[in-house]
Image (tube, rainbow, N blue to C red):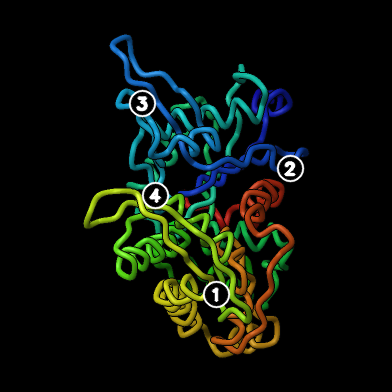
Amino acid sequence: MLDQAIRLISNDLSIDLGTCNTLVHVAGRGVVVEEPSVVAISKAKSGSQVVAFGLEAKRMLGRTPQHINTAYPIEHSAVNDFPMAEALLDACIQRALGRKPMIGPRVVIPVGRDLEETKRRGIADLARAVGCRDVILVDSLMAAAKGCELAIGDPVGNCVVDIGGSTTRAGVITLGGIAASASITTGGNAIDRAIVDWIKTEHQVLVGARTAEELKMFIGSAIKPSEVRETQVTGRDINEGIPREVTISNSDVYEAIQIPLQTIVGCIQQALSKTPPELAADIHDHGILLCGGGSLLVGMAEYLRQVTKLPILVPEDPRRCIAAGANQLLTDATLLKRARLQ
């Protein structure tokens, strides 16, 4: 009875704690926080203080004085800087609820099934450190499938591919469980790094990751462009050490990102190669569900369709389906038990 009373005055949250973006979904309200997973902390003699988080902190990257530290504290679904990750998560929860809750919320956090036990504990410890009452870790692919309203409890094979910031995961789901899966540490950030490396090699100019990301979003394409588009970027000449502007085309970006794209395809093929024949037939008929921020790259669905020869389905909001599905799992005790990782 006490637990039921607490649930009436507390909140159920799902938190998609990603390398690039953090989303908070509140039961009955939907996704109320969607911010870059960046936090800026001022270091002073009196102690550290949060200066900014999310988009505001992202705008500070590479532009802060020495006393302000700005970073992404989550990588590959693991905490790589606990104090900064704690500051980020605390700020996101307070914004989602509009206050510091008197009673900690029940929180479900989707992570990869392949995540090491110590790293899972790190995520759970992080949530408890900011006051979460009950922390449930669930399989991120199961959450994505649930969020896209797939009938994952049926004896039918569904293939889900999540292209995140630092990780790509592919899995085949049937009867509420994972039949085959694969994961790689390649995602949107690897595509950005490939653009940085290409410009450095071809133009002897070093640009930042933020510039590369903007290029990817503005003129990037996974398929060969049919018409030329160009833009100018400014970086540091690696020989003379001075700022220099160069012209980059969409064909340049297309060429630059081929290796990480091929690596992502390899992950999908690895998962499919482990799939039982009966489930493979289902996937041939129903196709692959593509989600995560990486699915938003222009031409990504068409590229995967050309390479795999399978239908590629992209939900209306591929970045939010994992957070939404994780929250929905709380209302299905059977699926929650199968998706739970701790």
> What whole-number distance in Å separates the C-alpha atoms at marks 1 and 3?
37 Å
Q: Position of residue 322 (x, y in %)?
A: 62, 54
Label tally: 4
- Mark 3: few, some, or many residues within 10 Å (few <14, many ≥20)? some
| Amino acid at circle 1 | Ala
C-beta proximity under 8 Å, tags 1 and 2: no
| Amino acid at circle 2 | Gly
Q: Earlier in the sequence, mark 3 or mark 2?
A: 2
Up/down of 165 relative to 281, above or below: above
Q: Nearer the viewer, mark 3 or mark 4?
A: 3
- Mark 4: few, some, or many residues within 10 Å (few <14, many ≥20)? some
> What whole-number distance in Å separates the C-alpha atoms at marks 3 and 4?
21 Å
Q: Residue furthest left?
A: 239
Residue ID for mark 4: 75
Residue ID for mark 3: 68
Residue ID for mark 1: 222
- Mark 2: few, some, or many residues within 10 Å (few <14, many ≥20)? some
C-beta proximity under 8 Å, tags 3 and 2: no
Residue in the foreground of this view, choosing between 260 and 337: 260
**Drawn side of residue 25 relative to residue 224, left or right:** right
Q: Give the residue at x 51% y 70%.
A: 249
- Dot label at residue 295: none
- Dot label at residue 30: 2
Q: Position of residue 18 (x, y in %)?
A: 50, 48
Q: Nearer the viewer, mark 4 or mark 2?
A: 4
Q: Give the residue at x 57% y 32%.
A: 92
Q: Earlier in the sequence, mark 3 or mark 4?
A: 3
> What whole-number distance in Å separates the C-alpha atoms at marks 4 and 2?
25 Å
Q: Nearer the viewer, mark 3 or mark 2?
A: 3
Residue in the foreground of this view, choosing between 29 and 226: 226
